[in-house]
Amino acid sequence: MEPSNLNPRDPDDIRLESLIRASASPELPDAGFSSRVVAGLPKSAGSARWWTQRNFFMIAGGGAGLAVALLAGGSPAAVSDIGPILSSAIASLSSVIDQPGAIIALALGVGIVALLYGDEALE
């Protein structure tokens, strides 16, 4: 069985590896195959395109939500006064957040969002 750090311990393994490394050439001739493969790889613009699409849908969704709120009878003044309403709603959530189930659900939600979008946030 190999050691967990994959470094050989047996002197025969060390001797065999040194013989293999001594006879190996530093580069394998491939007649430009590697450079053609690397040149054919897609550029990293795909992630930028996804970021742009996601922003478009987020803005469009926010605009659609605002339009629905206004068409459902809300006035622009009522929409602009939503700050105090949201703050009182968040304050009323304090009793819910004290429950362990809500904390677990919140942690799961944050974890799922981090798994889905975490790699894009790091770019």
Image (cartoon, rainbow, N blue to C red):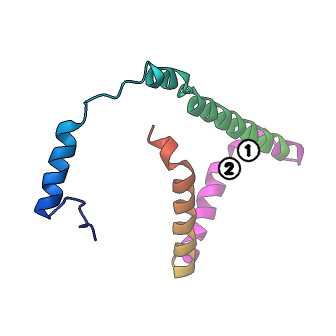
Residue 120 horizontal/vertical position (percent): 51, 42
As displayed, is residue 25 above or below residue 19? above
Secondary structure mostly taken by the magenta-highlighted segment of the chain: helix
x 45%, y 21%: residue: 35
Q: Which residue is mark 1?
A: 79
Asked if the stretch drawn in magenta spans residue 83, the answer is: yes
Look at the picture and state if 110 lies above or below 52. Answer: below
Outermost residue toward the bottom in this view: 100
Tell whether 87 sits left or right of 78. left
Q: Is residue 99 in view from this perspective?
A: no
Tags 1 and 2 touching, CB below 8 Å = yes
| Image coordinates for residue 82, horizontal then vertical, percent | 68, 49
For the N terminus, the quadrant is bottom left
Q: On the picture, is 24 further left or further right than 58?
A: left
| Mark 1 → mark 2, Cα distance in angstroms | 5 Å
Q: Quadrant of residue 47?
A: top right
- At 55% from the left and 23% from the top, the residue drawn is 40
Q: Is residue 28 above or below residue 104?
A: above
Is 4 situated left or right of 50 in this image?
Answer: left
Residue found at the very far left of the displayed protein: 11
Asked whether 21 falls inside the magenta stretch, the response is no
- Secondary structure at badge 2 equals helix
Give coordinates of residue 84: x percent, y percent: 62, 54
Q: Residue at x 34, y 29 (%)?
A: 28
List the residue tagged with mark 2.
Answer: 82
Quarter-wise, where is residue 53 in the image? top right
Going by the numbered disc 2, the residue's amino acid type is Ile
